[in-house]
Amino acid sequence: RVVAVIMVGGPTKGTRFRPLSLNIPKPLFPLAGQPMVHHPISACKRIPNLAQIYLIGFYEEREFALYVSSISNELKVPVRYLREDKPHGSAGGLYNFRDLILEDNPSHIFLLNCDVCCSFPLPEMLEAHRRYGGMGTILVIKVSAESANQFGELVADPVTNELLHYTEKPETFVSDRINCGVYIFRPDIFTAIGGVSTQRKDRANLRRMSSFDALQSATRSLPSDFVRLDQDILSPLAGKKQLYTYETMDFWEQIKTPGMALKCSALYLAQYRCTSSHLLASGDGTNSASIIGDVYIHPSAKAHSTAKIGPNVSISANARVGPGVRLISCIILDDVEIKENAVVIHAIVGWKSSIGRWSRVQAGGDHNAKLGITILGEAVNVEDEVVVVNSIVLPNKTLNMSVQEEIIL
Ligand code: GDD
């Protein structure tokens, strides 16, 4: 039997995701019309003998309750949210719930970061992991040398795929192969995490008894139950024939900012072509808007037949898109109203917002630029004929004048 664990973090983590994370936990923000965490969860469905999926985080339990019960029914696999009382780090969080996780007596445990977007080749990883015979296997991808330092950089043996060296977000270049935040472990990973935790406790005790300065400063900051998977487990275990790598040639991105959410929404919409084409709007119906490329429209949303939508657009529940509206590369959230002849390009439009007639809400579209995307928070009201370019507007604002390159607080 196999268990999957998805690390969802908590409210102090998603700050770069503001203002969207003011309304909803980042893991529940919709990408291609489905909550972010839905994509790794539905990928877990392909794992043979999957017994349970756990989400571990430090958000309030009630924020996940509804989603967890509906997805359990849909997938026919039990999904449970486990709440930490405080952040324990990516490995400490897992360790905290070891008794529960081991209840199913799993032979393997998948561990997935919630904020990555990829094809999650989990059965393929499991097969490779069994062949390698190590304690853990890490999903790896090659990225550009310039971007590698935002991630864990690693070196693997080209023949055996053994992890030889691992450095988390190094200052000087190590490798263009990086850690994708998707792992499979044998249950003895808990012994390794427990070891780090005990070592910390011993050092803390020693420190209390010792006046040795170096020892004091080296161990001062981290509590013994806070264990990071990357620095505390992967780095020391590299080169010890315990960890191996599996390289993906498919797509992979990390989702820390709203700009990346828009990019990842496009990647998942493109993936629907192969995996769930029924979710893509076809534009076939007599009253349907014209659809260009990959578009998701929630069944309760309404788009006028003279609207032109796509590519990379997803429209959530109860949104209304008026006559002559043009939407390109955007996420329109629940209950939004877009009035006649308005244009939205490279933007995220927050819940219950409204965009007036002949208005434009747009951005340049560079996902890495700070303001390469325009974001309207919840319940923003853009009046008729107003142009909003490369701007971020916080919730509950009314814009009656055009703005450019501004953050409206
Ligand atoms: N439950 C829980 N508790 N989750 C946590 C905690 C915690 O205390 N701390 C982090 N997480 C979750 C985050 O929500 C995220 O899904 C994952 O664990 C990793 O988060 P970070 O530890 O903040 O690392 P990162 O995202 O900057 O980088 C990690 O992932 C990259 C891939 O996306 C590293 O492992 C990198 O090496 C890797 O490249």
Image (cartoon, rainbow, N blue to C red):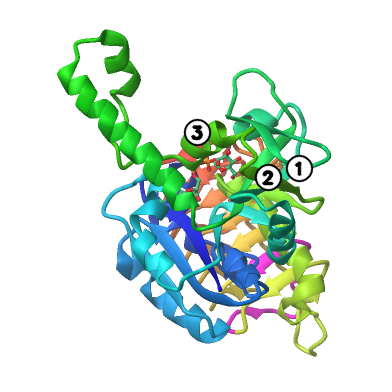
**Highlighted magenta segment, given as a residue range:** 300-314
Which residue: 55% across, 32% down? 235
Instruction: Inspect this view and state whether residue 192 appears.
Output: yes
Q: Earlier in the sequence, mark 1 or mark 3?
A: 1
Q: Quadrant of the C terminus?
A: top left
- Secondary structure of the residue carrying numbered label 1: loop
Residue type highlighted by circle 2? Tyr
Q: Looking at the image, is mark 3 or mark 2 nearer the viewer?
A: 2
Amino acid identity at mark 1: Asn
Is 148 situated left or right of 79 in this image?
A: right
Please identify, in this view, whether the residue under mark 1 or under mark 3 is nearer the observer.
1
Q: Position of residue 342 (x, y in %)?
A: 66, 62
Give the number of the disc on residue 161. 1
**CA separation in Å, label 3 and label 2:** 16 Å
Q: Position of residue 201 (x, y in %)?
A: 27, 34
Q: Residue at x 59, y 24 (%)?
A: 170
Tell which of 172 and 212 is nearer to you. Answer: 212
What residue is at 31 percent from the left and 42 percent from the top?
225
Query: Residue 231, labelled with which disc?
Result: 3
Q: Nearer the viewer, residue 134 or 265?
A: 134
Is 295 part of what is drawn in magenta?
no
Q: Kindly check if marks 1 and 2 are in contact, taking CB atoms under 8 A apart as contact.
A: yes
The residue under label 2 is 244
Quarter of the image holding residue 110?
bottom right
Classify mark 2: helix, strand or loop: strand
Beta carbon of the mark 2 residue lies under 8 A of ligand 1: no
